[in-house]
Amino acid sequence: MNRDEILAALTLDSSSGFDRMELLKSYPEPVARYFRRHLPQGIPGGTLISTRLRGIIKLVNWSNFTSTLYTNPLKGFLWEATVRMGILPIKGYDYFNKNTGAMQWKLFGVIPVTRADGADVSRSAEGRARLEGIFAPHLLIHPAVTWEVVDKNHITARWKINTEDQPLHLIIDEQGALKEVWMKRWGNPGEVKTFEYHTFGGHIHKEILYQNRLIPHKGSVGWWHGEKQWDDGEFFRFESY
């Protein structure tokens, strides 16, 4: 599936038949606080959200990247990037769409470097698609998303795109700012032999108003969030711009 087909499918509207503002009124206070903070100008339109990201990613070593993230958390995502390994540009994308996930990366955009697909990759990508929802908070106001309160600063969201239904955990402060996000995600970090669930998440260091919504501006993401292996699992430090 090429990028244009992926983007066309992600753009399809899944919000007909309900009013986001009315649905928001039914949410308990910690959840409502999160949305008040992140939608300060009201609920924006659009079902496919694009966000430019840059930073460093750990492949063999830490390398610079620039990218665009396209996300519709009820359907999937597409992440297109250019990674600089020394002076060599590697271009490619990761995606989840129509219940299928894959990644494809090429040197100079031509010479294949890596490609991964299959059932385990799709299952892992579905988990990532839900985590990317923090960049499109208004789309998480949806009847398919079940919100629950753990305590006044810990809320969870749960929904399925295909089969995965692990809750997405959000830690917010007294003003509703997002500080941490994590979930149990299917994967094989560190090239372990078999796929299984591991804690995956990140720390949000700063937020920014971006296209009428407040989103993460600076943060770090990786496997084994909140665990002693975090230093080995962290692989992505980003800035939205």
Image (spheres, rainbow, N blue to C red):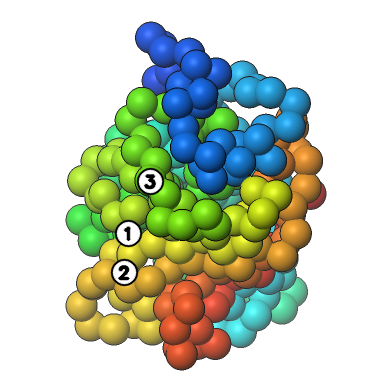
User: Percent from the top left, x then y, of residue 165?
Assistant: 26, 49
Based on the displayed image, in which of its 4 quarters is residue 218 positioned? bottom right
Nearest the eye: 197 or 12: 197
- Mark 3 Cα within 10 Å, few/some/many (few <14, many 20+)? some
- Mark 1 = which residue? 124
| Residue matched to label 2 | 187
Most distant residue in the top direction: 17
- Say which residue appears at 56% left-offset and 36% top-offset: 32
Sequence-earlier tag: 1 or 3? 1
Q: Secondary structure at mark 1?
A: helix
| Residue 199, quarter of the rendered image | bottom left
Residue 174 vs residue 164, the one in the foreground: 174
Distance of mark 1 from mark 2, alpha carbons?
6 Å
N-term-proximal mark, 2 vs 3: 3
Residue under the point 31% across and 69% down: 187
The disc labelled 2 sits on which kind of residue? Answer: Gly
Please name which of the two marks, 2 or 3, marks the residue nearer to the observer.
Answer: 3
Q: Is residue 32 rendered to the left or right of residue 129?
A: right
Q: Position of residue 159 (x, y in %)?
A: 32, 41
Q: Is residue 139 above or below residue 165?
A: above
Q: Residue at x 50, y 84 (%)?
A: 230
| Residue at numbered disc 3 | 148
CB within 8 Å, label 2 to label 3: no
How far apart, in angstroms, are the residues tagged by discs 1 and 3? 23 Å
Mark 1 closeness class: few <14, some 14–19, many ≥20 residues within 10 Å: many
**Separation of residues labelled 2 and 3 (CA atoms):** 25 Å
Q: Are marks 1 and 2 in contact (CB under 8 Å)?
A: yes
The residue depicted at 54 percent of the width and 45 percent of the height is 30
Front disc: 1 or 3: 3
Q: Amino acid at mark 3?
A: Glu
Give the side of residue 157 with respect to residue 174, left or right. left
- Which of the two labelled residues, at mark 1 and mark 2, occupies the earlier sequence position? 1
